[in-house]
Image: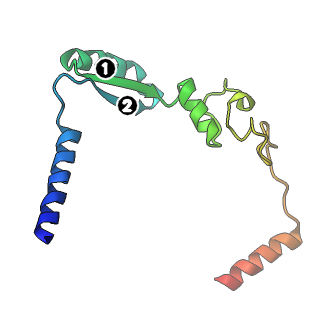
Amino acid sequence: MANQHLATSLGIIIAALGLAYAPILGSQQRLLVVSGSEMQEPLQTLEARFEQDNPNIQIDLTFLRAPAQQATFVQFGFRPGAANLDLATVPDSPWAESVPGAAVNPPSAAETPSQETSSEIVRLWQRAN
């Protein structure tokens, strides 16, 4: 019985690996490539050549500085690398949802803590170490 379960499990694994790595004749496969924007021009040239040589594989190129990618970063609370993106207009972002503490234009510097606060931080640090 145990050998039968082992054989069944191995068969499933082999079939899954075969389907994952071996192309199915006549099917269109997609390959997603995410790259830095500095590689946009050479990758687009390579993409055309690759798709010509491999007609069953379609490459979808997306770049980190592309507006769609920047909006995705903003939805997860990251500030965009592209300055032309309005944080408050990106749906499902902390800025559009008015999450407390998510300021579109945060202050440029934090207040300097008092001498008493700094001394207490140093004392606690030294006690812990």
Q: Please tell me in which quadrant of the rendered image residue 48 appears.
A: top left
Q: Quadrant of the C terminus?
A: bottom right
Compare residues 89 and 43 and report the one nearer the observer: 89
Q: Amino acid at mark 2?
A: Val
Compare residues 20 and 36 and report the one nearer the observer: 20
Query: Mark 2 vs mark 1: which is more N-terminal?
Result: 2
Residue position marked by numbered label 2 in the rendering: 33
Residue at x 61% of width, y 28% of height: 82
Horizontal relation, residue 8 to residue 35: left or right: left
Residue 123: x, y in percent? Answer: 76, 80
Q: Are marks 2 and 1 in contact (CB under 8 Å)?
A: yes
Question: In the displayed structure, would residue 73 be above or below residue 49?
Answer: below
Residue 41: x, y in percent? Answer: 39, 18
Residue position marked by numbered label 1 in the rendering: 47
Question: In the displayed structure, would residue 99 be above or below residue 119?
Answer: above
Residue 32: x, y in percent? Answer: 37, 31
Horizontal relation, residue 113 to residue 73: left or right: right
